[in-house]
Every structure is written in structure tokens, then in C-alpha cells.
Image (cartoon, helix red, strand yellow):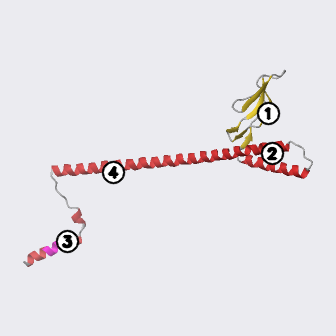
Amino acid sequence: MSKKKDNHEQTAEAAVETPETEAQQTCTLTAEEMEEARSHIESLQKKLDETVNLLQRNQADFDNFRRRNASVRADSYEEGRRDVITALLPILDDFDRVAGTESKDEAWAEGVLLVHRKLTETLQKEGLSEVETDGDFDPNLHNAVMAEAQEGVDKGKILAVFQKGYRVKDKIVRHSMVKVSE
């Protein structure tokens, strides 16, 4: 018995001394077990690939959503800017009319011109510019409210401007109201 006990102690000591030898032990599988293990590994690999593809699609969808949202936000901001500027145009027209009249009170007239200049400069900083009315009529820029035949003037020339037109950056916010030659 003591021999058996000594052998058992030696085996335990060997196992304690070299734990990596247990992991390196070989296992014998039948062909059926091997095929089952291979099939299980393939199904796990397939599930892993599907999960990775799903995550990649989700990431791409999120990136597209973020880009689309940024674009919508920028467009909305620009549209709001144009709306505010368009709402201020009648006030700018009133200042233009007042600036064109004479006043007996020079201090008042100078104050009005100062406010007019300040409003104009502020709107220009926000992208407002006047639509050109020199030269030919362009239906994309002008609104012809009258037509008149004049000698010596080619057809389609702008004769008079009744209301200034404006654009904010590249978008027309108000067409110029003009009289055109026939």
C-alpha cells in the first residue's frame, strides 16, 4: 500500500510541478464527434460573421443619420436666416424712402440715415445683397410689372425699378419689381 501511496503522491507532485502538460494532452475523437465539433465551430463562425456585418451596417446607418442630421440642421438654419431677413425687408424699404426725402431737422435726418446704414450693414453681414437691375430683364431675378415702348431702347431692357430685389447668399428672397421696354 505504501507503494501505491508513493505513486499517487508522485503523480500529484508531477501535476503540480507541470500544469501545462495537462493542457497539452491529446484527446482522441471519433470521426462523428470531430464532424460535430467542426460543424459547431462553423455555425459559431457564421453567427460571428453575421453579427459583425450587422454591427457594420448599424454603424454605417448611424454615420448616414448623423450626416443627414447635420445637413438638415444647416439647411434649417439658413432657411431661418432668410425668413428673418425677408421679414426685415419692408423696414429697409421704409428707411430707403425716408432717406430719399428732405427734412428740416438735420439731426433727425442724420439719425435716420445712421440707423439705415447700420441696418443695411448688419443685413449685409448676414449675406444680404441687392439684385442687379442694370441692363437686361431676367425673369429669374426681376418681376416685370409694367412694359413700355421707348425709342432708342432695345426690347427687354429695364427702364425703372419700383422695388429693390434682394438675395441672401445665392437664393433670391425677393424679386425686383421693374418696368421693362417693349
Q: Which residue is mark 1?
A: 161
Magenta span main SS? helix
- Which amino acid, mark 4? Leu
Q: In the image, 10: left or right of 121?
A: left
Real-space Cα separation, disc 1 to disc 3, in angstroms = 106 Å
- Which amino acid, mark 1? Val
Which of the 4 image quarters holds residue 8?
bottom left
Q: Which residue is mark 3?
A: 14
Q: Which residue is mark 2?
A: 95
Q: Position of residue 74 (x, y in %)?
A: 60, 47
Q: Residue furthest left?
A: 1
Q: Earlier in the sequence, mark 1 or mark 2?
A: 2
Q: Position of residue 51 (x, y in %)?
A: 36, 50
Real-space Cα separation, disc 4 to disc 3, in angstroms = 40 Å
Q: Residue at 33% across / 51% down in the picture?
A: 48
The stretch in magenta equals 8-12
- Which amino acid, mark 2? Phe
Q: Residue at 50% across / 47% down in the picture?
A: 65
Q: Which residue is mark 4?
A: 48
Real-space Cα separation, disc 3 to disc 2, in angstroms = 102 Å
Real-space Cα separation, disc 2 to disc 4, in angstroms = 70 Å
